[in-house]
Amino acid sequence: MHGNTELTELLDSEPYYQTNDGAAYLGDSLELLDELPEESIDLLVTSPPFGLQKKKEYGNKDPDEYNDWFMDFADRVYRVLTEDGSWVIDIGGGWEKGKPVRSIYHFELLTRLAGSDGPFHLAQDFYWYNPAKLPTPAQWVTIERIRCKDAVNHVWCLSKTERPEADNVRVLQEYSDSQKELMENGYKDKKRPSGHDISDKFDDPKEKGSIPPNLLEIANTASNTHYLKACKKLDVDSHPARFPRQLPDFFIRFLSEPGDTVLDIFAGSNMTGRVAQDLGRKWLAFELQEKYLQTSKVRFMTMEEIDKIIDEDQSALDDFEEFAELD
């Protein structure tokens, strides 16, 4: 696995900001990916703009042009990914315009990425269930009541090889109370109605925890995080589409080792970089919109440093206020 090369030496471009463990770059990810050496990235974790009919302030493509646009990134990601590396893509579905019918653009994209002619393997598909999602689209869900709310994102783990770096021991979960009771009292080995043969080893686990399923229940409801408090103090807008810390945390622990290099090519508020650094990984972040990259710096600043900017460093405060006013 990679992780020994000086990060800022990997690219010709100058970083927008950097820490001891990572660097963030302003620019088109297609061009920045071209600067990276082959097989220099161990893990990519990203949430691209989705292919939605409704336009978002951070920019997104229409579903009918989305997949061609995305495949330009895929070719470059394949080149920079290590042989045993993974690419984690959080992607949401959409609806056909004016119809209570789901768009299948993201399924069509998956067949291009990992189908018979695709460059990647689909190592596993995950599903992020966000119970806090609003009941949308309102016309079909809350007005006509002919559809249920869409509360699941697809998360694809793609890889160049059939056996990428992965270890589910790194993401074991605490046993449920019922499982703890079962292991404490023992389990009589027998066949279940399904035909599965449960042996007497069932209550003698090797590891201290249960293996997680591929359904990740994470409520995206955080409203008092360091990032949000810092943006409020600086009087700047936060990124409108942040994913929760638990999502990159799970995949970074599962699919990489300390010292590996993690990249996000649609960095936004750079949650991926922050989590990667907290977990002892190196990180790179690419972001096209300067206002988001500028405010993402607060993830790597203490509240004391932010207070000092407000109290003493007028030029730095002007920078934040300038980007807060951008459309």
Image (spheres, rainbow, N blue to C red):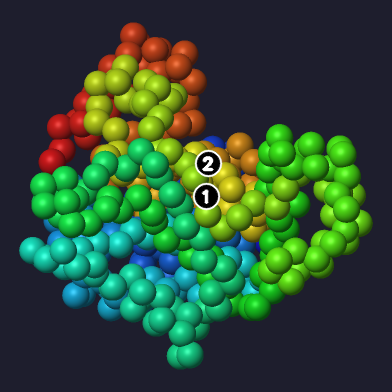
Residue at 68% of width from left, 48% of height from top?
Answer: 171
Label 2 to label 1, Cα distance in Å? 9 Å
Q: Position of residue 168 (x, y in %)?
A: 71, 55
Residue occupying the far front of the picture: 193
Considering the numbered disc 2 on the image, is that residue within a helix, a strand or a loop?
helix
Does the rendering let one see residue 146? yes
Looking at the rendering, in which quadrant would you find the C terminus?
A: top left
In the image shown, does 282 or 250 lie closer to the viewer? 250
Does the rendering let one see residue 15? no
Residue occupying the far bottom of the picture: 117
Which label is found at residue 267?
none
Q: Position of residue 26 (x, y in %)?
A: 34, 50
Q: Which of marks 2 and 1 is nearer the N terminus?
A: 1
In the image shown, does 93 or 22 lie closer to the viewer? 93
Q: Are marks 2 and 1 in contact (CB under 8 Å)?
A: yes
Residue on which the image places disc 1: 216
Residue occupying the far top of the picture: 311
Query: How dense is the environment of label 2, judged by Cα within 10 Å: few (below 14), some, or many (20 and up)?
Result: some
Residue on which the image places disc 2: 246
Q: Relative to 248, is 77 above or below?
A: below
Residue at 59% of width from left, 71% of height from top?
Answer: 123
Closer to the eye: label 2 or 1: 1
Query: How dense is the environment of label 1, judged by Cα within 10 Å: few (below 14), some, or many (20 and up)?
Result: some
Q: Position of residue 172 (x, y in %)?
A: 71, 47
The kind of residue on which mark 1 rests is Leu
Residue at 42% of width from left, 61% of height from top?
Answer: 154
Q: In this view, does 193 lie to the left or right of 14?
A: right
Q: In which quarter of the image is residue 297?
A: top left
Q: Is residue 218 left or right of residue 161?
A: left
Looking at the rendering, in which quadrant would you find the N terminus?
A: bottom right
Q: Quadrant of residue 52?
A: bottom left
The kind of residue on which mark 2 rests is Gln
